[in-house]
Amino acid sequence: MKSLFRRRSAHVAPPRHRGVLFRCFKSLQWALTFVVLIFLIIQLWFFGWLLWWKYVPPQETHFMSIRLSELREKNPDARLSYQWVEYGQISDNLKRALIASEDAHFVEHEGFDWNGIQVAMQKNQKKGHFVAGGSTISQQLAKNLFLNPHRSLLRKGQEAIITLMIEALWDKERIFEVYLNVIEWGNGVFGAQAAARHYYRASAARLSPRQAARLAAMAPNPRYYDSHPDAKGLARKTAIIQGRMGASQLP
């Protein structure tokens, strides 16, 4: 009986060791609490900006800041071309073209197009590398406002959280209005008005169906198409988008 008691006692940590384990546990607990607190502060920061931008046009997005820094590495005096215009001052042709091209179910979903994501995953699996993302207009806006263009699981997770905030705080018209005004459309060119001036010397309100479809075709890779206006496949993509514009549902 005594030998059995001794064997059991041998496995019980002495008081000194239990104290070390307790301190390690408490340190880990404090570290996790600190990480969670920082995470919540960051989310509140995003939430605050989105609440402000619900009523006030963004003066600059994180994407704009990144591109401006890149341009100023080559030219210290470089500036972005960006001019905010109200939703009603943007041609319905451009609105229909972007929905047809980027997010056909924009007015129906709540930030995520699960069918689109599944199709994109199938395309990526078939090609053996990343060729499609399945991102909605709301997701793209979240990325443009706050994040960087580099793909990672961490960025996609944060993008999803911001997307949920956008959909909760803004209606679809406001989401689309901000998107139309801040997305990149060329080297230092941001928003519908700047794009219309840059490519057609026209206002965003006066874009024709063909012009709008071409801008929508350029949107996934705008800086490349800005430098390569006669790129192979651009005319074909423009024609496809123009053919789909009639089915687009606007917010």
Image: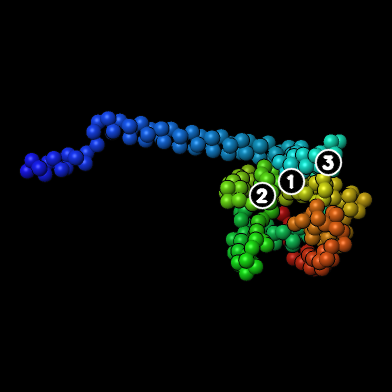
Q: Nearer the viewer, mark 1 or mark 3?
A: 3
Picture quadrant where residue 94 is located: bottom right
Q: Which residue does the numbered mark 2 point to in the structure image?
A: 150
The residue nearer to you, when weighing 246 against 130, is 130
Q: Which residue does the numbered mark 1 point to in the structure image?
A: 178
Query: Which callout, 2 or 3, points at the residue further toward the start of the chain?
Result: 3
Q: Nearer the viewer, mark 2 or mark 1?
A: 2
**x, y percent for residue 97:** 78, 60
Amino acid type indicated by mark 1: Val
Q: Residue furthest left?
A: 1
Secondary structure under tag 2 reads loop
Q: Residue at the location (45% across, 34% down)?
A: 31
Rendered image: mark on residue 74 = 3
Q: Residue at the location (33% across, 35% down)?
A: 21
**x, y percent for residue 239:** 82, 67
Q: How is the image coloured?
A: rainbow
Cα gap from disc 2 to disc 3, whole angstroms: 21 Å
The residue nearer to you, when weighing 145 against 207, is 145
Amino acid type indicated by mark 2: His
Q: Is residue 17 above or below residue 8?
A: above
The residue nearer to you, when weighing 64 against 197, is 64
Amino acid type indicated by mark 3: Lys
